[in-house]
Amino acid sequence: MTAADAGPVPADEVGVRYEQDGPVATVTLCRPGVLNAQTPAMWTELGNISRKLPGGVRVVIVRGEGRAFSAGLDLSVAKGDGDSSLTRLAQLSAAECADRIAGFQTAFTWLRSPSIVTIAAVQGHAIGAGFQLALNCDMRILADDARFSMAEVALGLVPDLGGTKRLTELVGPSRALEICVTGRRISADEADRIGLATAVVPPAELDGAVSDLAAAVLAADGGAVAEIKALLAGAPLRSYAEQDRAEREAQTRRLSDLLGAGE
């Protein structure tokens, strides 16, 4: 099925496919011929999926079709003359350009919503926008052939699709700076060692590992999972006292939801 049974444009044309099996939704980048290089049209569809996501979905898996997760921004679009090309963006006022980029960001940032747990299944290259798509997910299961790279610097640009905060939280500001300013490739083994990977498995085991993780999430109480995700996401911004308070408030809501109706 498609998100809310909507979307008149075929997946192979827009480059994004949505499938749902009960509480698990799978979003697949499906331009394997160009290593799932991303376009603004794909970002629009990702944003559409987020707005139409059925309420019963608890886990969203993001994957790439073929031998790569995503080679990043499609340079034929970026360097072309379309409305979303780098040249056209540069011609906008500062406010208009920022607004356009804010629209692009929504295709990625919905994956951080507390109401769902998101898992990136990464094989092959995850470069630039591909790396940031994986970073916006809560967890990243990597095939051992996966390679990350924050390659925007090669174009004189900065990462702007919601990946820099998560990257800094995972590896620390010094290492995040080194990764972003060098644009170097990070192997699956290194990603595991520095905290970018939740797990690394052989390519043939990637789908099974992701399915097992999704099943483990679904086995837990949905309300508790949502509260835990929100607690952990907000923890870096809170003092110990503030985090203690957030825990108390979350637990009070849980007790009310679980037991309050029976009193």
Image (cartoon, rainbow, N blue to C red):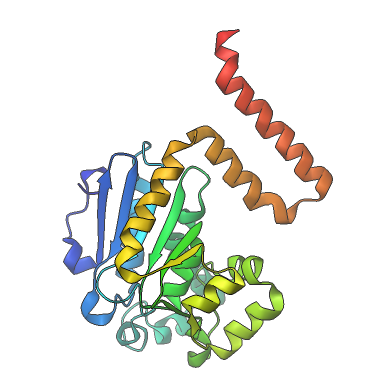
Say if 30 sits above or below 92 in the image.
Answer: above
Q: Is residue 232 left or right of residue 66?
A: right
The number of numbered badges drawn on the structure is 0
Say if 210 sits above or below 162 in the image.
Answer: above
Is residue 93 in sight in this rendering?
no
Q: Nearer the viewer, residue 64 or 143?
A: 143
* Quadrant in which the C terminus appears: top right
The residue sitting at 53% across, 74% down in the picture is 191
Is residue 246 in sight in this rendering?
yes
Q: How far across and down, in percent of the image, does residue 186 sit?
A: 51, 82
Q: Is residue 144 left or right of residue 181?
A: left
Q: Nearer the viewer, residue 170 or 194?
A: 194
Say if 93 sits above or below 216 in the image.
Answer: below
Q: How far across and down, in percent of the image, does residue 143 sit?
A: 39, 70
The residue sitting at 26% across, 69% down in the picture is 65
The residue sitting at 29% across, 62% down in the picture is 28
Q: Is residue 41 left or right of residue 217?
A: left
Q: Nearer the viewer, residue 86 or 59?
A: 59
